[in-house]
Structure formats: structure tokens, C-alpha cells
Image (cartoon, helix red, strand yellow):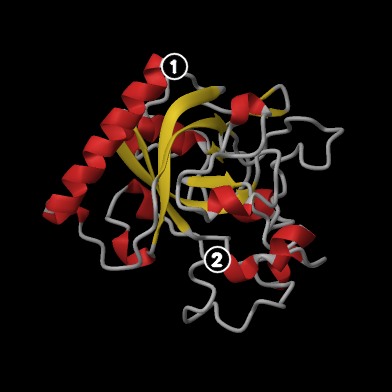
Amino acid sequence: MFEDTLCKVEAVGRQLWDSVSRGGALRGRKYPWHLCLVATTFWVGEIYDPAAADGSQVISAYDGWWYERFGGCDGVIEDGVCQTEPRTAENGFFPTSMTPKQNPFYLDLPFDDVNNDAAFAQRGRIPWADDPGYAGNLENREFSYMKNRWVQLRYKGSTCYAQIQDAGPAEYDDVDYVFGDGNTGPKSTRFNGAGMDVSPAVVGCLGFTELNGTQTGVSWRFVDDVDVPDGPWKTIVTGSGYDWSSGGPAAK
């Protein structure tokens, strides 16, 4: 309780500073902050629960070929199992045993706008639904409004950016949390009520206390492309769209 209160006091202070400083000026749309939430860790190649339909990060909600398109295990393979690993600023928080083909700064949010019927029906609530490059696709089941969107994350004074590459955790149609005014928390109670999964690069960049677990006190908001500053998160920017085709990466 004390940690949550401290987080919110710090977050409100940062918002006030942003509002009066040049650093808080946004060129794109202004999105609300979602303050002091729980985040968990996931990574490309992780097998969390082989018996569950959503228990593997070999695929994602938006990419049936995520593992291949990313370039393999986003970590280290030990005894045939893809495991996470610590990340440091020395190499931009990139994996140490492989070279990714896509942005290693990624996350998910609990709104699968393509495969979940309830979320698909709510796509009109997505703030950028009518923007150039998105408009006209509300009924297109081969187009995701979520994949590759940028999110700004904060934790204890650190700020990082990441792209959405999956949906979850646990829920897939949490429209009031994802697109609300920031006052509605996640509806899921699983994983300590986590409101997002974040990649190992984000874990290292934000300085989480655990390598693979849950972390309280994480705040986030959407940001438009023009408001993403230079940093290791822009070394590789993922641009591939929704793809569950049978041909995979070779067919794109």
C-alpha cells in the first residue's frame, strides 16, 4: 500500500513537471497515463504453459511466425529451453546470444483487436482508428490497429519506450482499461492483477528488481511515432503487420 501511494505521488509530480516543462510537450496526440500498475515479464520463445492456448510466445496474437520473424529466442537456450537473461545498457539492452531482426523493446496489452470478437467490435474506440494508415480497416480481420504501436513506460524515475507485439496478459477485450481515462485498472486478477507483459529489454531498461516475475509501480501511456525520442528502442523498429498466413515470413 505504501509503495503504491509513493508511486502515485511521484507519478503526479512528474505529470505536473511535464505540463510546465518543454520536455512535456507532445507533437502528436496526448494520451492519458495509466499509473502504478503491475507488469510481468515475457519474451519471444518462452513456453509458459504448453497446455494453454496462450501459453507460448513462439507465436503472438498478431504473428503466427513471431519466433522466426524475430530471429529466434530472445534470450539464451539452456537444455533446449528458451530462457530470459539479464540485460544491460552496455549493448542497449539487446540479447547477448543472438541478433534480433525486430525490436527487442516490446510489450503486450489486454486488447486483441483482431482475434477476440468483443475487442474487434470495439475497435472504433481506438483513438487512432481514423488516422492515415489506419482509417477504413474497422471490418478488416487481416489488419491490427494495435501491433507496432508505441508505448511510453516509467518505473522509479526511468523512462523507456516499446512497441506492442502481442495481447494479454490473461484478458483480451479490456477496452475500458486500455483506452480509458487512466482511472480504470485491469479487470484481470491473474498474475497479481498485471496490466501488461514486457520484454527483457524493457525489464533491463526500467531496472526491475526481478528478472522474471511481477513488478509493481509501472506506469504507461500510448505515444504517437513523432513523440518517441531516440534511444536503444529505435535501433530496430518493427514494421511487419498482422500475419497468420500459412506461408509465414517467406510469403511476405
Asked whether, in this view, residue 88 is left or right of residue 72, the answer is left
Per the image, label 1 sits on a secondary structure element best described as: loop
**Residue at screen point 58% across, 32% down:** 194
Q: Amino acid at mark 1?
A: Met
Per the image, label 2 sits on a secondary structure element best described as: loop
Asked whether, in this view, residue 3 is left or right of residue 15, the answer is right
Residue position marked by numbered label 2 in the rendering: 126
Q: Going from the N terminus, do you reach mark 2 or mark 1 first? A: 1
Residue position marked by numbered label 1 in the rendering: 1
Local crowd size for mark 1, using a 10 Å CA cut-off: few (<14), some (14–19), many (≥20): few
Q: Amino acid at mark 2?
A: Ile
Number of dots carrying numbers: 2
Quick one: quadrant of the C terminus?
A: bottom right
**Image height check: is 161 above or below 243?**
above
Where is residue 33? Give x, y as percent. Answer: 39, 47
- Kindly give the residue lying farthest to the top in the view shown: 2
Where is residue 199? Give x, y as percent. Answer: 52, 38
Where is residue 56? Give x, y as percent. Answer: 74, 39
Where is residue 207? Give x, y as percent. Answer: 37, 27
**Image height check: is 99 above or below 243?**
above
- Kindly give the residue lying farthest to the right in the view shown: 51
**Residue at screen point 49% across, 25% down:** 215
State how far apart marks 2 and 1 are (Cα). 32 Å
**Residue at screen point 20% across, 59% down:** 25
Q: Nearer the viewer, residue 99 or 240?
A: 240
**Image height check: is 42 above or below 151?**
above
